[in-house]
Amino acid sequence: MAPGRIVVSGAGVISSIGAGVEDFERALFQGTSGIRTDGSNGAQVTAADVAGFTPQQWLGNKGIRVLDRSARLLCVATHLALEGQGPARPAEGDDGLGMICGTMFGGLHSIVSFDWSGLTDGPSYVNPMEFPNTVINSPAGQAAIKFKLRGINSTVCAGLASGLYAIHYGAEALRLKRARVLLAGGVEELCEESLLGFRKTEVVSTVGRVRPFSRESDGTVPGEGSALLVLETAETAAARGVTPWARVVGFGCSHDARAISAYDPSAEGATAAMELALESAGVTPEEVGGVIAAAGGNRAGDAMEARALSKVFGQRLARLPVTAPKAALGEAMGASGALAALVGVLALKRGMAPPTAGCEGADYGLSLSRQPVPLEGDFVLVNAVSCDGNNASLVLGPADGGGR
Amino acid sequence: MRRVAITGLGLVTPIGSGWKRFWDGLLAGTSGIAPVTSFDTSAFPVHLGAEVKGFDPAPHLRRRPPESMGRGAQLAVAAAWMALEDSGAELDRYPRRRVGVSMGTTSGEPLFIERYNDIRKANGLDAVPGDMLPKYPCHTIPANIAIEMDLRGPCLMIPTACAAGNYAIGNAFDLLRSGQADLMLAGGADAFSRITYTGFSQLGAIAPERCQPFDKNRRGMVPGEGAAVLVLEPLDAAQARGATVYAEVLGYGLSCDSHHMTAAHPEGDGAVRAMAMAMTESGVGPEAIDYISAHGTGTPTNDRVESIAVKALFQERAARVPISSIKSMLGHTMGAASAIEAAACALAIHTGMIPPTINYQEPDPDCDLDCVPNQARETHPRVVLNNAYAFGGNNASLCLSATERA
């Protein structure tokens, strides 16, 4: 990594367990699950969705009609991230203020509906105003317009690792002075098409529960949401007069290069991603005080991650606090990595690993807890593993960093 | 930070595959634009497209069958193998974790959305096959390249619409110069899609007869498809292994208009900032730029605004800097476009020739630039800019140069 200390000086989030960092943090540390079953549309759907989502509450009514669900989620996260900056909020129209958005699908429902309209009504009856929502970078583009984000604006897709890739992309862009302040994270919507995808690919738990790192687990639960971290250099944060929460210290990634929808039982790539992240951070495994795991109830994926964790941490894994936020948040796809990174930041802020909702103990020689547990070191490792073979890990550390 | 070289070019375009055929075609002013054949356009008011005709993915795939991936990935994997072979880099000499993939796209694999809707209309949702769905997400394009070539390094898609290729190449440049990778395959890919076609048609943006960027009578763009992959590596490593260096990547600039999802900022605000940032990062001023590869879609607005932006930066020199649009020949290949154009920029530096803007008949006072009308030109450019603009107000300019610039 290029030199330069990158800090997290705020965040915005909308999720199945709450909107805004305060509510999210409270629910997270209480071990609240966002998974619920909704029967209002006839079929019973179990998901970690943003129930009763009313974006008007934050965004007002103006200009909201053209935004699809992804854009609305991302705009709410943006609003909350900027609002949380208080008087230090970057001025509107700041050329150095940008966004890096991880996503897997963008506005999937918009894309499908646009084509469906052309197919059933004929191409000349399609509303051209809906065309822009079909590009995958549409949520980030809409947020840029709404919040006058004139700096770099990128969208990053790396499967279930998109959110972590986006945060790394943002950190690098700041180190290279491409931007001054970046909102980096991810967004994913749940819609009828993504729910159908979860069902058809047979990755959903039949009991409607995410049991991370469990040999009995039979699948995941679909999730959605958006999380954005406010990233900048330590110097910029000091100049703006904001107190950083944490520091982005290292990143590593590795692709398995095997299949677009299978996990590698050897766990070589996932191990390499963690090792590379620690190496780039200059942090030893012994200095890691807790892990925010990618585990989301997919047995093969969780077994792979457990194996990699065991290779990296050895005997210490049994005592290392591990949190699996997907037990509460479900599999939020392109947003998962960003949500996990936010969980990591909040863990550092409190010095405690948050509980894993509804889970006590685990298989594979590691343990999850229903209660917050003190971190066992200064740094937190955040993992993302994706069924396409992408593995990414992020190392977060205390904001003051102690000279590192 | 390390200097970064472009050492391999792989192209699958509407005027042919492989950089030699592509480049010969561009210099000869060959058009790849023709009536659309991949779907029925009778319900549309326009009929032109720039398709890659007769593309057979099978010979290009070594590890997995064509049906295991979408057309976007097929085009991309074909371009990736061509680029790697062209570079002469032997993968076995690299730790696989140090070789990565960075791609751009507008729509990823939209043909799976179309098939989903076709099946849904004909037989209902229950008939949608589950095994089709994992092939849809756009990150499967770089993942398929990684799988085909057994590449274990960074692997990502940057779907920043019609500027995506430049973003992806820029990202690869960053990963190399900061030492996070030793070899990167970077570029863009998009498959011809009725979704894209419907959208641009309904915006009234598709040219009815020809694509004629910068011409007074230009009436629009022409949707296309294709892929370009570039091999990037540290310049010292390229020189040490005796590789052909087509060009050096000097830097790039990104910006966002934050103005409108589809329309450019009227003064080209973001376009100016992206070009300026690219030049600043590259350590060159406007006086050093010998050629600009225009975004140049051929829509009335794009070419006017791009001209305004170029004039704002280049001032009195603006009319003397050649700026051409190869979209006049290739149509707008979406997320592949700026990667294909980056390859053309590298070839301009390598061969000394600059490709023309074809179909140019009548000058437009709003576009009073030297658009290299109709004939390729030998100018031996040393430093070039590659412009790309996209939905979402995204702007990306990439600056390439010859390795010796004195």
Image (tube, rainbow, N blue to C red):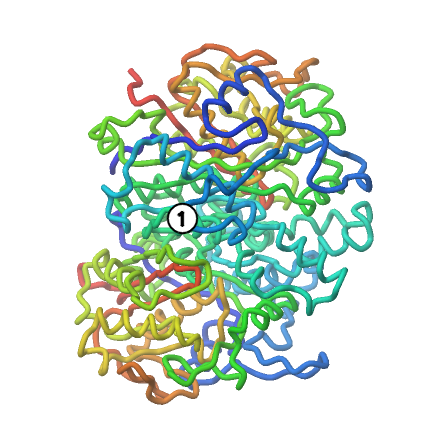
Query: In x, y percent, where is residue B310?
Result: 53, 24
Question: Residue B405's image quarter?
Answer: top left
- How many numbered discs? 1
**B350 above or below A129?**
above
Query: In x, y percent, where is residue A275?
Result: 23, 62
Q: Residue at x 59, y 28 (%)?
A: B330
Q: Does residue A106 appear left or right of residue B234 in this picture?
A: right
A223 or A299: nearer the eye?
Answer: A299
**B45 above or below B261?**
above
Element type where label 1 sits in the image:
helix
Query: In x, y percent, where is residue A223?
Result: 53, 72
Q: Which chain's residue wears label 1? A: B
**B119 above or below B157?**
below
Q: Residues within 10 Å of mark 1 (few under 14, many from 20)?
A: many
| Amino acid tagged 1 | Glu
Q: Residue at x 71, y 60 (%)?
A: B119
B259 or A191: nearer the eye?
Answer: A191
Q: Does residue A184 appear left or right of residue B302 in this picture?
A: left
Name the quarter where the C terminus of chain A is drawn. bottom left
- Residue position for label 1: B148
Query: In x, y percent, where is residue A300?
Result: 39, 73
The answer, for residue A170, to whether it is visible in the render is yes
The answer, for residue B308, to whether it is visible in the render is no
Q: Does residue A137 appear left or right of residue A117 in this picture?
A: left
B276 or A396: nearer the eye?
Answer: A396
